[in-house]
Image (cartoon, rainbow, N blue to C red):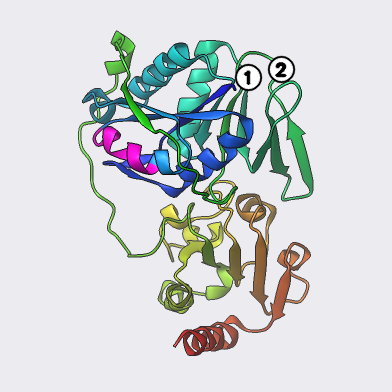
Amino acid sequence: MAEILVYVDHVDGAVRKPTLELLTLARRLGEPVAVALGNGAADTAAVLGEHGATRVLTAEAAEFADYLVVPKVEALQAAYEAVSPAAVLVPSSAENKEIAARLAVRIGSGIITDAVDLEAGDEGPVATQSAFAASFTTKSRVSQGTPVITVKPNSAPVEAAPAAGAVEALAVSFSEKATGTKVTSRTPRESTGRPELTEAAIVVSGGRGVNGAENFAIIEALADSLGAAVGASRAAVDAGWYPHSNQVGQTGKSVSPQLYIASGISGAIQHRAGMQTSKTIVAINKDAEAPIFDLVDYGVVGDLFDVVPQLTEEVKTRKG
């Protein structure tokens, strides 16, 4: 059976959920071989093996932390050359899509980004993508070289499938280009205790209708009652009501949760582009003609300042 290379997204050995989802998809195509780089790479093997990785290639060089993406690209290229996989799968994120694109150029292959599903085809993996604010669903395959595919978080379930997970050291030699851009400092992002926006199963977002930074407390209260992440529209971010790191949309982050709740968001095409693949969409807006209602599964026409607090209390009551 063909081997499928899976790039591991982890933090000091703690594997992030999108990687485990990738292993589910990789098993549809062949035998997953994971590539873990950086501090704690070897510590990922147990979890990766529990979810289907037959082998785990690891490298823990300091270059992965001290420099930008090129060392990771060169390590992934070394893994590609060692394995000769039928496909390379990478979790979608801003950095990972750059890694995937650079790898595709180096190995002379085509690339597909932000896939929401994968299936085996007669001529290689077939990727499903959602485009133009969910107006179209496309199915594509790479016709040149080994497919390099980035997959959006929450595109597949996390399924246990015990495999060997044998750890193998990956030999990597870095070029001069790999150390051309050095990281000079890092500032840890303040933790909110909420899930990472792009990985969350539930996202509650606020828009222009929230009408002020102080009113985002209403959105946060609903999110906390659901164990959800908090998002914001571009209008809310541009007004300075919420951080840019929480922006959902074409110029922000792309999310694909099981449940997306949009409060006071009109539904401009730029926002829809960032949340169109959500499994269930609920909108709360006092304007019955708001474009967001064309996209939703459930819509509530009403003032969010009345609806959202009642929803929060109802959630708390049912949970407690």
Q: On the image, which quarter does residue 138 sit in?
A: top right
Q: Magenta stretch?
A: 39-47
**Residue 46 magenta-drawn?**
yes
Residue occupying the point 46% across, 56% down: 197
Residue 247, position as x, y percentages in the image: 49, 55
Residue 110's disc is: 1
Q: Measured along the vertical axis of the image, is residue 246 above or below residue 177?
A: below
Q: Measured along the vertical axis of the image, is residue 14 above or below residue 282?
A: above
Q: How far is mark 1 from mark 2, CA to CA? A: 7 Å
Residue 55, position as x, y percentages in the image: 41, 28
The local crowd at label 1, few if under 14, some if 14 to 19, many if 20 or more residues have their Cα within 10 Å, is some
Residue type, label 1: Gly
Residue type, label 2: Ser
Tell me the quadrant of the picture where the C terminus can be found: bottom left
Tell me, yes or no, whether the two marked residues, 1 and 2, touch with CB atoms within 8 Å: yes
Residue that label 2 marks: 143
Who is closer to the viewer here, 231 or 291? Answer: 231
Residue occupying the point 78% across, 64% down: 294
Tell me the element at label 2. loop
The local crowd at label 2, few if under 14, some if 14 to 19, many if 20 or more residues have their Cα within 10 Å, is few
Residue 241, position as x, y percentages in the image: 44, 66
Q: Is the magenta region chiefly helix, strand or loop?
A: helix
Residue 239, position as x, y percentages in the image: 48, 62
